[in-house]
Amino acid sequence: IIGDVHGCFKSLMALIDTLPYKEQSKLVFVGDLVDRGKYSAQVVEFVKNGGYDCVLGNHEAVMIQAHRYEEAEGIVDTYSTKRLWKLNGGRNTISSYFRANAGKMSEHLAWMKNLPRYLEFDIADENGKTLFITHGFGLPFWKARNKKETAIKLRNNRLVKRVDTLKIKEHYAYEEGFMAYPVFNVFGHDVVDNVVMTQSYAAIDTGCVYGRLPKSEIMYLSALEWPSKRIYSVPYQG
């Protein structure tokens, strides 16, 4: 299960190369394939053509909405949505569709529109919990996962909050109340310094794309192997 790629195609290839079975593994993506990095079109093409499972991330959702492929959830101004998308990494996505990928955006958008809001796999871990994959922290909404109004919560809910102006983060979700759930939630969306692992959930977005910024700390693209929960990570490589 691979964390938020955000257009870091070279990093994705490097991560897959560390996996025991490489591309022969059943790869599953938590969404946010696009934006911010240089190679969004290449990432989407790889995931789409490989037939790999992927849930809809908030960046795919905004990209779809910006191109009028569906009515925006709570957003009625398409112009503002397109502007929001561009300001949050969409410009790099547009650039990735030039040259070799010209003409593929419509095909990719149609594919994104059909991505599920969550995925479940009947493979149990050491505690008997089966796998529940979402983009955002979806465990609080597992019981209501099939309700239409829950879709945006599965995508946008956060595990991490900032606690002061220095951007120090703390996890505000605790296991109490989740231990009785029969599922283990793996998700991205929240950037964490290291994979956060409890008996009920794992946050696996380790912020790879931010490694492109000048003077940034080393940031990683991470994957979680299920059901062993072994972690694989590679530093940002583009």
Image (tube, grey):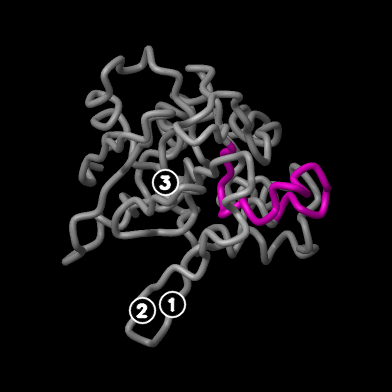
Above or below, comparing residue 96 to residue 141 in the picture? above
Picture quadrant of residue 107: top right
What amino acid is labelled 3 in the image? His
Q: Few, some or many C-alpha atoms within 10 Å of disc 2 (few <14, some 14-19, many ≥20)?
A: few
Question: As rendered, which of 157 and 142 lies closer to the eye?
Answer: 142
Locate the N terminus and report the quarter of the image it occupies.
Answer: top left
Residue situated in front as seen by the camera: 229 or 106: 229
Disc 3 to disc 1, how far (Cα)?
22 Å
Which badge, 2 or 3, is on the more N-terminal residue? 3
- Mark found first going from the N terminus, 2 or 1: 1
Q: Amino acid at mark 1?
A: Arg
Residue under the point 78% across and 45% down: 70
Give the quadrant of residue 39: top left
Choose mark 2 or mark 3, whichever is in front.
2
Q: Mark 3 or mark 1: which comes first in sequence?
A: 3
Question: Label 3, on which residue?
Answer: 6
Q: Residue at x 54, y 44 (%)?
A: 185
The Cα–Cα distance between marks 2 and 1, rounded to whole angstroms, is 5 Å
Q: Which residues are magenta?
A: 132-152
Q: Secondary structure at mark 1?
A: strand
Residue bearing the label numbered 2: 167
Task: Name the secondary structure under disc 3.
Answer: loop
Marks 2/1 in contact by CB < 8 Å: the verdict is yes
Which x, y percent locates residue 137?
56, 54
